[in-house]
Amino acid sequence: MAGALLREVGAALADLVLPRTCAGCGRPGAVLCPRCARCLAAPRPAQPRRFPDGFPPTVAAGAYAGPVRPAVNAFKEQGRAELATPLGAALALAVAAVRLGAGDRSRPVLLVPVPTSPAAVRDRGRDHVRELTGRAVGELRAAGLPAAECRALRRQGRVRDSAGLSAPERRANLAGTFALDARRRPAGALLVLVDDVVTSGATLSEAASVLAAGRGPHELPVLAAVVAATPRAPAGPGGAGRWRPANGPAADLDRLSPPGRRD
Ligand SMILES: [Zn+2]
């Protein structure tokens, strides 16, 4: 706790002493400038190159390309925790979009963070996915959507480094990694797995299959939302545009603040 507090104080002091720059493009000013933030205000379905078995319907707030890559990496690997605000807002947008797609607007939405490995949490000194989840829940509630965090999954066992593995190998590497926390088994709610980035989709597929195993036969499928997804094709100017599900009013999306409004 003391370490987290010190880091927070350190970040606040750094804000006062050091000029801030956009984590996406390096321009002085906001932690994520409006131009870069716009890249995370275009929710779209995540489309891995090869859909792994059991890949859940997933919406990403933007493409993991251009300025989004350095911004996510600065948050995740370089300790720029202040990016939790714009990236959490982006995640909230993706959750609201995937919820609209599900069509059932009466149920509360539970955000289930994909658990980070204990080794990664130790290395980084923080759990960045939990930070994003907390911010996203706050944004959704502020927009009037019934949302809460639900830590229904936990890590078990060890996973070897997945660099260089094919998609099926990644999935096999992840088998048995996640376990359902029976005390938190959620019923009746819309479950949305949340993570920072989706690339091959192996992690989300594995996590969704474990989460779905605890569901009753008449419950809605597990959905997923991420900040960014690896694009199938290089994103052109403006990317694929802002995606709106066809079967639902988009008012939820409009109520949410865009990722770069505050920092
Ligand atoms: Zn920028």
Image (cartoon, rainbow, N blue to C red):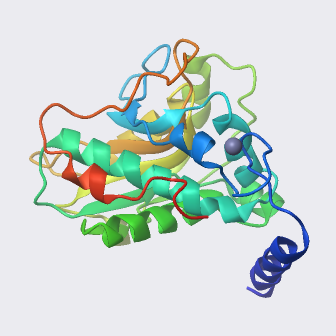
Query: Residue 42 at what x, y percent from top left?
Result: 42, 36
Q: Quadrant of the C terminus?
A: bottom right
Vertical order, 11 against 19 (above or below) = below
Looking at the image, can residue 16 be seen? yes
Q: Residue furthest right?
A: 17
Identify the residue shown where x is 22% and y is 34%: 245
Name the residue at 90% across, 67% down: 18
- Is residue 175 among what the camera can see? no
Q: Position of residue 89 (x, y in %)?
A: 48, 57
Q: Give the answer, above or below, for where 144 lies relative to 205.
A: below
Q: Nearer the viewer, residue 12 or 214?
A: 12
- Against 58, is 253 above or below? below
Point 29% across, 50% down: residue: 253
Where is ligand 1, by quadrant? top right
Q: Quadrant of the N terminus?
A: bottom right
Q: Is residue 29 left or right of residue 19?
A: left
**Residue closest to the eye, 147 or 25:** 25
Q: Is residue 165 above or below residue 139?
A: above
Residue 8 occupies which quadrant of the picture? Answer: bottom right
Q: Position of residue 69 (x, y in %)?
A: 69, 35
Residue in front for this viewpoint, 117 or 128: 128
